[in-house]
């Protein structure tokens, strides 16, 4: 027994030394391999708790510290940026075990994808700046659910899904509604940060004598000013970039799988990103989901060859008529951005419009119209409900 205790003590001391050399006080791993370490640490701690083996405070508290750091840096689907962990693995399983070990309701919330259940509450912060690690996370919210409550009717909750803009020493990423949309490698150093109830401000060095300022207008817009002339394509590498992008507007567009539109089934919207140039040194970033309910269709011939990102849907007709082929037209936001000095005017047509006066680290916001409220039932929803009711019920066998 004495020999076993000596071996255990030696193991704990090696673990302490390893954690001290590899992780800083915020939980950041300089070798960008924290998830593998967390897997081992949580397994050891679970076994220790089961067998009533004392865990040194330095290790117990450090593991919780690392898990909290990963939680705040995680994407809505539970993955972590390669700037944080080069494996880009999913952290949810280890947050679940962390919630058990540390009795953390926020770990439990993120581990289960934001589901509403007992002892499950979203994390305290949305935007966070890890000063020693040089990492800033600008998050629209913590609602990270992946599924609809009902496939036959509109689920307004999907409008609140999360978009994240993260800046780290290795570069920048944007993830909206569970999808990586933008990735830009390059040296980044955060020079300033200010958190306000309505906005978050930060200043970032992006190269020699190059700086940009970011104003996060919660929850859906990022305003960016630079001290250098910009080209949108050089600012971000957009995944699934639309062929319709140009020098003043850059946006992503995704391909959708075939759906059963004649039954009124809803398809899960995919996250997209939109960059709109305001001046030669200013632009707007908007993360959003593609609203499949409002997509329009265009008839195409049987021999039409779709582009890589286009979705063709077949509609079955009655009376022996041949099925119709139609191309889905995506609903791209109609964004207008005008900047005059320190004043920004933003119009997102049919959604919202507002004015921002931004001077240095201070900003005021004036909404020109009310932000849209959640509507219980729209006309389209009623039509879908009728379709739902029209689906014949199968009779129970006696």
Image (cartoon, grey):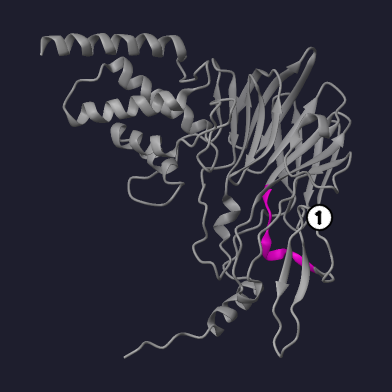
* Horizontal relation, residue 122 to residue 141: left or right: left
Q: Quadrant of the N terminus?
A: top left
Residue 199 in view here: yes
Marks counted in the figure total 1
Label 1: how many Cα within 10 Å (few below 14, some 14–19, many 20+): few
Q: Residue furthest front?
A: 303
* Horizontal relation, residue 253 to residue 86: left or right: right
Where on the picture, by quarter, is residue 172?
top right
Q: Is residue 291 magenta?
A: yes
Q: Residue at x 58, y 35 (%)?
A: 197
Residue 204, placed above or below residue 214: above
Residue 244, placed above or below residue 10: below
Q: Residue at x 52, y 15 (%)?
A: 30
Percent from the top left, x then y, of residue 363? Answer: 70, 32
Residue 6, placed above or below residue 363: above
Q: Which residues are magenta?
A: 288-297
Q: Quadrant of the C terminus?
A: bottom left
């Amino acid at each position: 027994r004495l020999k076993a205790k000596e071996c255990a003590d030696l193991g704990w001391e090696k673990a302490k030394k390893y954690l001290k050399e590899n992780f800083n006080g915020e939980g950041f791993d300089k070798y960008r391999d924290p998830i593998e370490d967390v897997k081992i640490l949580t397994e050891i701690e679970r076994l220790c708790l089961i067998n009533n083996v004392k865990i040194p405070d330095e290790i117990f508290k450090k593991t919780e510290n690392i898990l909290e750091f990963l939680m705040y840096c995680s994407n809505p689907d539970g993955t972590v940026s390669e700037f944080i962990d080069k494996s880009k693995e999913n952290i949810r399983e280890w947050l679940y075990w962390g919630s058990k070990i540390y009795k953390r309701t926020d770990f439990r919330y993120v581990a289960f994808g934001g589901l509403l259940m007992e002892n499950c509450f979203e994390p305290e912060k949305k935007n966070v700046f890890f000063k020693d690690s040089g990492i800033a996370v600008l998050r629209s919210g913590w609602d990270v659910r992946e599924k609809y409550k009902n496939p036959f009717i509109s689920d307004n909750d999907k409008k609140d899904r999360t978009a994240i803009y993260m800046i780290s020493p290795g570069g920048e990423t944007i993830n909206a509604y569970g999808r990586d949309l933008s990735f830009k490698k390059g040296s980044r150093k955060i020079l300033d940060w200010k958190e306000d109830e309505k906005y978050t401000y930060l200043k970032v060095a992006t190269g020699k004598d190059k700086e940009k300022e970011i104003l996060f207008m919660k929850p859906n817009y990022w305003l960016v000013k630079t001290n250098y002339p910009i080209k949108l394509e050089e600012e971000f590498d957009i995944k699934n970039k639309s062929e319709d992008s140009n020098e003043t507007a850059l946006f992503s567009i995704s391909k959708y799988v075939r759906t059963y539109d004649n039954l009124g089934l809803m398809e899960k919207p995919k996250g997209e990103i939109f960059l709109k140039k305001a001046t030669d040194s200013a632009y707007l970033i908007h993360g959003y989901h593609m609203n499949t309910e409002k997509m329009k269709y265009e008839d195409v011939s049987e021999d039409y060859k779709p582009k890589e990102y286009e979705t063709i849907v077949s509609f079955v007709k009655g009376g022996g008529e041949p099925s119709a082929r139609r191309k889905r037209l995506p609903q791209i936001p109609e964004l207008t951005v005008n900047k005059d000095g320190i004043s920004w005017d933003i119009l997102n047509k049919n959604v919202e419009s507002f004015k921002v006066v931004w001077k240095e680290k201070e900003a005021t916001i004036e909404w020109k119209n009310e932000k849209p409220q959640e509507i219980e039932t729209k006309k389209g929803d009623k039509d879908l409900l009728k379709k739902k009711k029209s689906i014949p019920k199968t009779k129970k066998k006696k």
